[in-house]
Amino acid sequence: MDKQLLSLHFHTPRLLAIISLVVGFVLTGYCEAHAQQQDSLRHHSRHAQRRALVDSLRMQMRQAADNGRLLQWGDSLIRLKRRQGTLDSAKYQHHIQHLQRVDKRLHRNDQLLKSHYQRVNFDTLYIARPNERWTIKLRGNLSGARLKFDGKDERKAFSGDLKADYRGTMSVAVAYRGIALGIAINPAKLAGKSKDNEFNLNSYGNAFGFDIVYLSSKTYHGKVTSDGYTSYFDKGQVKQQAINLNGYYAFNHKRFSFPAAFTQSYIQKRRAGSIMIGTSLDAQQTDVANFDNNGGKVRLRIMQLGIGAGYGYNLVLGRHWLFHLSALPTMDVLIKSDIKENDNKVTMPYHFPSVIITGRGAAVYSWRNKFAGITMVYNTSPTGSHNRLYMNREKGRIRLFYGFRL
C-alpha cells in the first residue's frame, strides 16, 4: 500500500504537468478561435455596412430618378462652388435651370422606357423582369472557324482541313431597362499579332431574335491531301470573307425566354421549352493562292439561304441554376455557288439535302443581384458534291461572363 502511494505521489507532478499542457493548448486554441471569430464578425460587419451604404445610395438615386431629379440629386459640386465663392449667383441659377431642363427630358424618356420594360406580355409564373434597372457585365469571348472539304479533280481525290487562328476578346456591356451598349477589345489585335477581323451583332427577344457574324480571316492553315500526297497550307495562303445570319421565332415565348439565358434581361422561373422556326443565310468568298505550287489561284463563292424548324429548352434547377440547349436546322431553299480556277469559272453542283445548323447552349448561375455563366453558339453549313467539291464551314463562339444588377 505504501509503495502504491509512493508511486502515485511520484507520478503526480508529471501528470499535473501533462494536464496543464493540455489545458494550455485547449485555452490557446479557444482564444485563437474566438479571436478569429471576432475578426470574421468585424469583417462581416464592415462588409455589411459597405453594402448597406451602396444600397442606400442606389435607392436614393432611384428615388431621385423617379421624381425627375436624377441630375439635381448630384449637384453637390455646384453647391460647393457656390459656397466657396467661385460661382456667382447668376451662374449658379443658370446651372440649376439647365439641370432641371435636362432632368425633365431624361424623366420623360425614362417613363417611355419604363412602360415598355414593365409591359407584361408573358406568363409571370414562368418569366419575370429583374427589379433592378442597370445591368453591368464583364465578358470574355473566344471564337474560331474551320474549313473541311473533299472532292475529285480529274478523277484524283483530294481533301483538306484548315483552321483559322482563335480570336479572343474582352468586353464590357452596360444595359438600362433592356437597352444595352457594349465595347470589346482584342488584345492580340492591339499587339499586332492578329490579322483577322470579326464583327458580332446579337439581339435576343422572347419571341424574335437573331445573330449576325462577319469574319474576315487571313490565318487559315492546315493540310491538304491530293492523290495520296499531303501538303501544308501556311497562313496567308487562304483568305476568306464570310457572313452568317440566323434568326428565330419561338412559339412558346410567353413561357420560354431566350434572353434569360443569353442576355439576362429576363429571369426564367420555371422550366419551359418551345418549338422554333427560323431562317439562315450563309455567304462566303474564299481565295486560295498558289494552290498547285505553280502560282495557281482559286476563288470559291457560296451563298446559302435556308428555312427550318427546331426546338429550345430552358431547365431551371433550384433557385440559382439555369441551363439552355437549342438546335435550329434550316434546309437550303436557295444556293448560288461557283468556283473560278485561274480564268476558268464553273458552277459548283450540290446535292439535296443541304442544311445550315445553328446550335446554342448556356449555363447561368445567379445569386442575389449577381450572375455568372457561359454561353455557346455554333454554326455549320455543309454544301456541295463529293464528286466535285464538298465543303463544310464551321464557326463557333464561347463566352464567359460575370455581371451584376443595380
Image (tube, rainbow, N blue to C red):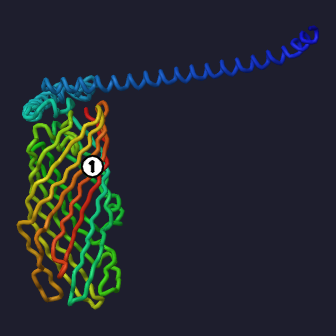
The image position of residue 255, as x and y in percent, is 13, 37
Task: Inspect this view and state whether residue 20 appears.
Answer: yes
**Which residue, as the protein is rendered here, is positioned at the far right?**
2
Residue 125: percent from the left, percent from the top? 15, 30
Determine the image quadrant of residue 300.
Answer: bottom left
Q: Nearer the viewer, residue 276 or 244?
A: 276
79 versus 223 height, above or below = above
**Residue 113 seen in render:** no
Q: State the quadrant of the N terminus.
A: top right
| 7 lies above or below 203 | above
Q: Judge from the rendering whether residue 221 lies leftward or rightward of residue 301; answer left or right.
A: right
Q: Quadrant of the C terminus?
A: top left
Q: x%, y% of residue 88?
A: 20, 27
Label 1 residue SS: strand
Q: Amino acid at mark 1?
A: Thr
Q: Tell me residue 343's x, y (percent).
A: 14, 89
Task: Name the residue tied to disc 1.
Answer: 375
Residue toward you, 170 or 362: 362
Figure check: 128 above or below 153 = above
Image: 216 above or below 201: below
Where on the picture, by quarter, is residue 60?
top left
Q: Is residue 315 left or right of residue 276?
A: right
Residue at the (12%, 42%) spot, across then down: 206
Name the residue nearer the viewer: 358 or 134: 358
